[in-house]
């Protein structure tokens, strides 16, 4: 069976008698569409430009597909606007063929055109039209993109696709997304026509929006992400739902390049002329930000030039020379002679423009940044991320207003001419749906110490407060006999360190961790990798088992941070480490604001991590008494059935490398930075008893590709063998939570990743000579889904936390997939902004002939998934994701940081034995596997806690 032939599991709805703590009405960010027309016709529309040029003294014509080109934001937006403006000219100039009603057409600004009429064309027929380009109808952006075009031809091809809108639910059930694609385009036509937005697929941002940031020249723009989903409890009553999710994203400002660079590094141009050469990190910061940006010249009299920046030069403008008309000339003198332009800041670097004819150099003051370019993840600083998060936190009472503002800005309405022409009714009321509030598990510290939720499902199991001084962990670990406390670069005083450690050890003893003591105190003067590795070697030789560091460095973002260096050394020398920031140490020692209660809470939170790192279990999850009363059962169904020892839970998540820049793509350079896969798994009855690993695969892959399955299969097999060693038997049911997969990748996950689990089980069967065929369930969890859920009635005067839905809120009716088993879960408590639910979809339910069990009932799956949100263990709050998946994400991040530190920011060829081209490719082919093996975790505890 091939991947495309995979049949995803049939939809299972929840039962009528679900045991819940509450039922509430919730408001979702969706709007129903009512389709009245029967069908639309699909065409391909290709716009081809002819550009004249000379070669060897002869005139030639170059054909250009105007919808294709570089993938940077500026080029994509310019092409989109050019195609739309040429499309409008096509309809106007050839109205005898297309008619005068432009609203019967829907265009994607690339190659697809839909029409209510067949235009008297047969399927397979192709027509050609000439567009007499009117430059006065083009704006500055598109005019420069269309420069030197002599002719534009439009080729219209009638495909054999007729989109049946009245039967769209049936075609959707068969996997055909054409109707959904058409509706997404229809709801974007006004955005395309208004030219007041930047459009990146289904993300749309207001061109004139500019939210200023503190101490950062970059800006935020408001916008939205929208999409169409076919929803319903079954395919017979399914209907399309338009989702609108307000967004904000960071953009580079449309300003002069020199102003941006100076504002970013925080100095004026004159001072920058000195500091950029005196401090290497200043040049690195500036180069990282501007490299890859599309810039436009300012000094030309006519027809300014745009190009993608290849980076900054390593020399100032007045020191860069090149050959021009038989003589050597500096960049500054060239601009003075050819453009009569005196460069004011001669000691600043130049921007490099690369071309087949050779490199060109532009002083910073001769360029500006094209507006409309987003700040990619790799260029986002922690300070920017913090401000983005703060600006994006929309409280529930404000969310409907934000959605309405974006809807009106995009002119999505039944009264719009496009909607009228297609006879589509738009319900402007946000969808209201009933949700269930599930009971959380009870928290078991020991047989006589169980924390129960109240009747409404609220649970508080913090380790501080009255009456819990004698509370002990479910399985406290004995403190390592050889433990060291290290102060790094004087981050705290020795007095603070001694006070903190003394109080921490006393708290650890009270929680059951016997022998808590630090036998060694030391101070390290440096943080570079060579120094830190030497000190780790010394501690290893002294048989040190645990190191607690007091150091800065957890908030920074480069591979040289002490935190990342220490975690790499942790793997190399197999010594468990814990990093405490100086502020936390002072709070925990009672030497900062917060009082005794705050100090105790800090120490408790630190010890929750410590006990897990050392192999302990902080608490267990059991069925609450409130649930048992309502369900009328007398047994622990959560511990004995849903999370029982016959089930093994896996989490799989990924940390992706940044995309390659334009020059790397044009040169065909193979990515040297991998995608890192993290995998966590439970080890028995207690879900907090978890192990995990990570490995590397080729970059920018959201799935595990067939060619990379050998590592995946081997790690699954290793996990199953560890489980068997710990429990004396293999698990009967494998339940996998997979992160980061989109709807279009569901079949890939079911076929390849599901197949890998089955392959690992087959290998065990062969090696052990047993018939091992466990049940297998795979659930894809989408953290970044477009769904938003708020109470139907919100008190705008309440705090954000009180305005949000309660943890355990589940939506599984009406607004979910009409064909797949799925539900929305708000597992966490949203302290700020609006809670973002996780969309959980079952993509595989495998049962062999030897397994008689049926698919997991939806009620059970929901309760089980929510209970796992309480399995993180290092804080007394539930997480948004089930614990195995949350931990897999943490492992992927740890693997990413270890990779960056080990390979010097991802340069896998740093340790290459040779530089020849042949050996380079040979070395690269095995680099991912080699470094995965070198960095493979070797601990049998939850070391990453």
Image (cartoon, rainbow, N blue to C red):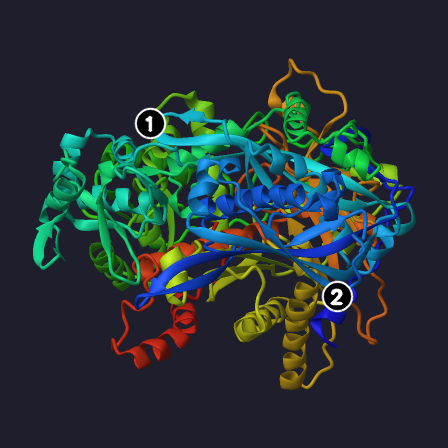
Q: Is residue 134 above or below residue 751?
A: above
Q: Residue at x 47, y 24 (%)?
A: 597
Where does residue 619 sit, x and y in percent of width and height?
Answer: 61, 45
Q: Is residue 571 left or right of residue 814?
A: left
Packing grade of label 1 (10 A; few <14, some 14-19, many >=20) is few
N-terminal-most mark, 2 or 1: 2
Q: Residue pushed farthest left? A: 327
Q: Residue at x 34, y 43 (%)?
A: 295
Q: Which residue is mark 1?
A: 215
Where does residue 573 sit, x and y in percent of width and height?
Answer: 33, 63
Can you tell which quarter of the image residue 368 is in?
top left
Q: Nearer the viewer, residue 899 or 335?
A: 335
Can residue 566 be seen from the camera position used here? yes
Q: Nearer the viewer, mark 2 or mark 1?
A: 2
Q: Is residue 729 above or below residue 136?
A: below
Where does residue 345 sit, x and y in percent of width and height?
Answer: 15, 35
Position of the N terminus by quadrant: bottom right
Q: Which mark is on residue 241?
A: none
- Number of numbered markers: 2
Query: What's the distance in space between the residues labelled 2 and 1, CA to CA?
Result: 58 Å
Q: Is residue 363 above or below residue 28?
A: below
Q: Nearer the viewer, residue 687 or 180?
A: 180
Where does residue 713 sit, x and y in percent of width and height?
Answer: 58, 73
Can residue 570 be seen from the camera position used here? no
Q: Which residue is mark 2?
A: 124
Q: Is residue 221 left or right of residue 927?
A: right
Packing grade of label 2 (10 A; few <14, some 14-19, many >=20) is few
Identify the element where label 2 is drawn. loop
Q: Is residue 737 above or below residue 768?
A: above
């Amino acid at each position: 069976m091939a991947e495309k032939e995979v049949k995803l599991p049939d939809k299972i709805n929840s039962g009528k008698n679900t045991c819940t703590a509450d039922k509430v009405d919730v408001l979702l960010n969706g709007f129903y569409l009512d389709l009245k027309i029967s069908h639309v016709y699909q065409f391909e529309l290709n716009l081809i430009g002819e550009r004249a040029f000379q070669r060897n003294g002869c005139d030639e014509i170059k054909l250009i597909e105007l919808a294709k080109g570089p993938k940077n934001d500026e080029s994509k937006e310019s092409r989109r606007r050019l195609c739309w403006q040429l499309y409008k000219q096509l309809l106007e100039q050839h109205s005898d063929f297309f008619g005068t009603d432009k609203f019967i057409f829907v265009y994607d600004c690339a190659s697809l055109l839909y029409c209510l009429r067949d235009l008297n064309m047969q399927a397979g027929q192709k027509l050609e039209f000439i567009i007499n380009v009117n430059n006065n109808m083009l704006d500055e952006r598109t005019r420069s993109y269309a420069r030197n075009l002599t002719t534009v031809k439009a080729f219209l091809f009638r495909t054999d696709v007729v989109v049946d809108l009245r039967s769209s639910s049936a075609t959707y059930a068969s996997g055909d997304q054409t109707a959904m694609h058409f509706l997404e385009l229809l709801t974007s036509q006004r955005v395309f026509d208004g030219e007041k937005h930047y459009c990146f697929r289904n993300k749309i941002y207001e061109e004139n929006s500019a939210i200023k940031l503190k101490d950062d020249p970059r800006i935020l723009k408001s916008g939205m992400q929208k999409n169409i989903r076919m929803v319903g409890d079954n395919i017979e009553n399914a209907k399309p739902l338009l989702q609108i999710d307000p967004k904000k994203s960071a953009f580079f400002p449309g300003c002069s390049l020199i102003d941006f660079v100076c504002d970013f590094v925080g100095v004026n141009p004159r001072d920058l002329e000195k500091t950029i050469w005196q401090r290497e990190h200043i040049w690195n910061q500036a180069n990282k930000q501007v490299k890859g940006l599309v810039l436009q010249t300012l000094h030309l009299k006519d027809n300014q030039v745009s190009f993608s920046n290849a980076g900054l030069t390593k020399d100032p403008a007045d020191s860069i020379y090149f050959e021009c008309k038989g003589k050597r000339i500096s960049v500054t003198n060239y601009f003075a002679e050819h453009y009569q332009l005196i460069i004011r800041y001669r000691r600043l670097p130049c921007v490099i423009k690369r071309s087949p004819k050779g490199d060109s150099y532009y002083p910073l003051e001769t360029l500006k940044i094209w507006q409309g370019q987003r700040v990619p993840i790799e260029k986002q600083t922690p300070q920017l991320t913090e401000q983005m998060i703060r600006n994006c936190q929309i409280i529930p009472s404000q969310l409907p207003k934000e959605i309405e503002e974006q809807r009106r800005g995009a002119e999505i309405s039944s009264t719009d001419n496009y909607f009228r022409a297609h006879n589509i009714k738009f319900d402007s009321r946000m969808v209201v749906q009933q949700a269930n509030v599930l009971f959380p598990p009870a928290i078991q510290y020991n047989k006589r110490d169980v924390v129960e939720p109240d009747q409404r499902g609220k649970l508080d199991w913090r380790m501080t407060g009255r009456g819990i001084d004698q509370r002990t962990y479910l399985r406290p670990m004995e403190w390592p006999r050889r433990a060291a406390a290290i102060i790094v670069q004087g981050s705290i005083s020795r007095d603070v360190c001694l006070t903190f450690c003394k109080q921490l050890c006393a708290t650890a003893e009270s929680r059951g961790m016997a022998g808590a003591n630090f036998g060694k105190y030391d101070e390290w003067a440096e943080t570079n990798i060579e120094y830190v590795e030497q000190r780790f070697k010394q501690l290893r030789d002294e048989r040190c088992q645990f190191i607690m560091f007091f150091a800065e460095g957890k908030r920074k973002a480069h591979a040289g941070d002490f935190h990342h260096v220490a975690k790499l050394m942790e793997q190399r020398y197999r010594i468990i480490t814990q990093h405490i920031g100086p502020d936390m140490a002072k709070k925990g020692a009672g030497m900062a604001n917060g009082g005794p209660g705050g100090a105790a809470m800090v120490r408790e939170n630190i010890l929750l991590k410590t006990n897990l790192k050392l192999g302990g279990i902080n608490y267990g999850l059991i069925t609450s008494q409130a649930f048992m009363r309502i369900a009328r059962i007398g047994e622990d169904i959560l511990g004995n059935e849903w999370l029982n020892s016959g089930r093994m839970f896996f989490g799989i998540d990924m940390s992706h490398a940044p995309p390659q820049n334009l020059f790397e793509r044009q040169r065909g350079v193979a990515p040297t930075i991998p995608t890192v896969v993290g995998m966590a798994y439970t080890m028995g009855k207690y879900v907090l008893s978890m192990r995990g690993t990570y490995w590397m695969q080729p970059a920018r892959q959201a799935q595990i590709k067939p060619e990379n399955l050998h590592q995946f299969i081997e790690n699954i097999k290793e996990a199953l063998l560890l489980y068997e060693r710990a429990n004396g038997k293999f698990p009967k049911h494998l339940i996998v939570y997979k992160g980061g997969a989109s709807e279009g990748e569901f079949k890939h996950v079911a076929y390849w990743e599901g197949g890998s689990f089955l392959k690992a089980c087959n290998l065990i069967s062969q090696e052990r000579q047993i018939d091992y065929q466990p049940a297998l369930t795979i659930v894809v969890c989408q953290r970044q889904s477009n769904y938003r859920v708020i109470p139907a009635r919100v008190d705008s005067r309440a705090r954000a936390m009180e305005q949000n839905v309660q943890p355990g809120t589940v939506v599984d009716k009406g607004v979910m997939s009409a064909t797949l088993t799925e539900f929305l879960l708000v597992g966490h408590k949203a302290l700020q902004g609006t809670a973002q639910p996780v969309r959980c979809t079952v993509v595989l339910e495998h049962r062999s002939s030897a397994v008689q069990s049926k698919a997991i009932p939806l009620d059970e799956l929901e309760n089980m998934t929510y209970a796992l949100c309480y399995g993180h263990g290092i804080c007394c709050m539930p997480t948004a994701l089930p614990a195995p998946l949350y931990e897999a994400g943490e492992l992927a991040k740890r693997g990413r940081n270890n990779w960056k530190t080990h390979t010097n920011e991802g340069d896998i060829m740093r340790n290459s034995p040779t530089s020849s081209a042949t050996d380079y490719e040979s070395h690269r082919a095995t680099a991912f596997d080699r470094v995965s093996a070198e960095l493979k975790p070797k601990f049998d505890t939850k070391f990453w806690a």
